[in-house]
Image (tube, coloured by chain):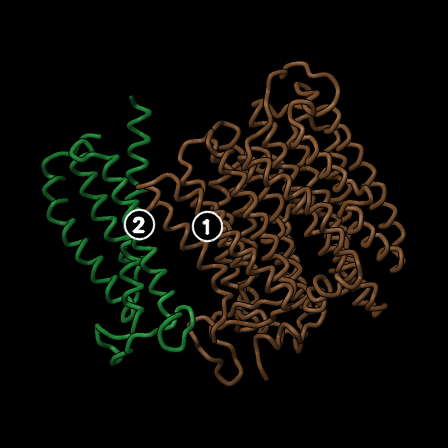
Amino acid sequence: MNSLIPLFVIIPLATAFLIPIIGKITNYFAKTITPIILLALSILSISFLFYGKHESYIIGGWQPVENIPIAIYLVLDGFSCLVLCITSLIGFLVSFYSISYIKKYTSENNFYALFCLMIAGMNGVVLSGDIFNLFVFLEISVIASYALVAFGVGKNELEASFKYQVLGNIASFLILFSIALLYWQTKTLNIADISKVLQNYDNSIFLTFTQIILITGFGLKAAIIPFHAWLPDAHSSAPSPISAMLSGVLIKAVGVYVLVRLFFNMFVFTYEIGVLVAVLGTLSMIVGSLLAINQWDIKRLLAYSSISQIGYIMIGFGIGMMILTKGGEASIAVLAIAGSLFHMVNHSVFKGLLFLGAGAIEFRTNTRDMSQLGGLSENMPITSTTSLGASMSISGIPPFNGFFSKLIIIIAAIQGKFYLLALLAVIVSIITLAYFLKFQKSVFYGKNKNYKNIKEVPFAMSFSMIILVILCIGLSVLAIPSIREVILDQAVSSLINMDHYINLVIQY
Amino acid sequence: MKGMSLIVKKVAQLIAGLIFLYGIYIMVHGHLTPGGGFAGGALIAGSYILAILAYGSDTIKLKKEETGTSLTESISIFIALMLAVAGFFIGTKVFFNNYLPSGKIGELISAGVIPLYNIFIGIEVAAALITIFLALIIYKEEIEE
């Protein structure tokens, strides 16, 4: 079995361990090797995406005994492949951006080592077909992110990191508890095997209890509204490349991805769970955007906006679940879920870009307070243009990708007769436009009061931002049906056809 | 940090070696008895920490020791990973493949690569715990200055 899947975990892990060794000799090793390996991984994952490679990998070569899988499985299907692409690609651009940005901190080697560890953990979460290993990789990635949030070791950073650790550990405890409950009832930890057992299982009280605990745990990781308290602090105190990584990728890979994977491929979800997901999504969408309006700290505004956009993603999945359980038209459910996945990809691109832009502003002016800034578009044309593109994209202005993904979700909501949800999605989109106009006006336009003699950021930083803004426009092509069929619909079909995932692991 | 009284120093001197040996025992018998890499490594780290506490940190160069332990940690965990990657190239060609002969059940040299994983994980855990301990002492001394 010559498969390349485990490379997604091995390579970042090996790099994370090599950096402290070779970094003692030369300082250039860490900052060259990290972008190189992530570029290689993103090329590999994109090729997997286009070849539609779906397979499972048995670690250690332990073959199933009497059709019961006993080994640790790595499973690659359309959905995990899509998330792997996001992780590697955003990781590559962020690590390239960090080459210039991270110079203002000491101990660059530790930064890159933790960064690689975080990537390895996220790739492990996405690939793991085993619920306990999923938990282990999740802990690897979030513990690396606790350290990265506190990387500035100032008062605010340490406070934010502490808050993040407390809430993150509560989430981890709940997740581990629900894994223990599932193991107790089903006697297995393999996701496909659990799902096979649960199909003939009728203790509905137990199942609902486990599902609620799981939603709470992963909701804390994904920062859906009642569980969002750690996010604004953690994402605004971290160094900007890490904010881009946390907001763009981490909350999706360890929060939304796992939630969706477990509910679609492991549990037999009920109508009530669909309603719950949609309600939580709507709540985060509205409250997140309302909280964002009044922020004057750039990165806090972006962090609250992340909560709001995660809401859009959850709504799409919620609509899909509700239609599927009510026995409605499957094509509408497919459309809603595809819209969610599309928005997930888009959000990681434009939110990554916005945080990198905020980092560029902070890099030159040393402030994040919008009331102090103004008129930077003349001094920093590249930062200004790219972040204008991202702002247009996140608020849903037509040629950019954000418009199409929101449109797909709203169309699906209207076709599924969820008129209120569709109306709210449109209203929140307008509120989003309002606070991003405020961001643009007070930072890049208007009068330049305090910062007249600043220059554009160095090449490494502007390069990443330009690539991301090109992606912002370029990803719109995913809305074209023939391209959508190749990329998004594969991911959707691997989600809604439960047997597809099970057959990957258990060959009958 | 100063050392403790003569009695404590003498007892620590007598016991630290025994704890160290017991740690090695737990580590290499990981595939036969309860315990393994993590437990053995924690014991080994304990013996070092006991000696440092008894004799005081003035007798060693803290920064130099910390560099050494963190280097040991990275190298041993890297070797453990490479042992797993070696499975790619030998035998059935999968990650974590157990490619060494498995031997007889119950003997010390058996179970293929698993004892090797235990040993390197033990070294890693020991080095990591000592690094954390040294970092805390360094932090305390920097605050006192």
Does the CB distance between marks 1 and 2 fall below 8 Å?
Answer: no
Chain B image colour: green
Instruction: Pick the residue in front: A307 or A14.
Output: A14
Q: Percent from the top left, x then y, of residue B88?
A: 40, 70
Chain A image colour: brown
**The C terminus of chain B sits in image quarter:** top left
Q: Which residue is mark 1?
A: A117
Q: Residue at x 81, y 54 (%)?
A: A408
Q: Percent from the top left, x then y, of residue A61?
A: 43, 76
In the rendered image, the vertical position of residue A35 relative to residue A162, given as above or below: below
Whether residue A206 is visible: no
Q: Which residue is mark 2?
A: B73
> SS at mark 2?
helix
**The N terminus of chain B sits in image quarter:** top left
Q: Percent from the top left, x then y, of residue A419?
A: 90, 52
Chain identifier of the residue bearing label 1 in the image: A
> SS at mark 1?
helix
Chain identifier of the residue bearing label 2 in the image: B
Image-based side of A134 in relation to B62, left or right: right
Residue type at the position of mark 2: Glu
Q: Residue at x 44, y 57 (%)?
A: A11
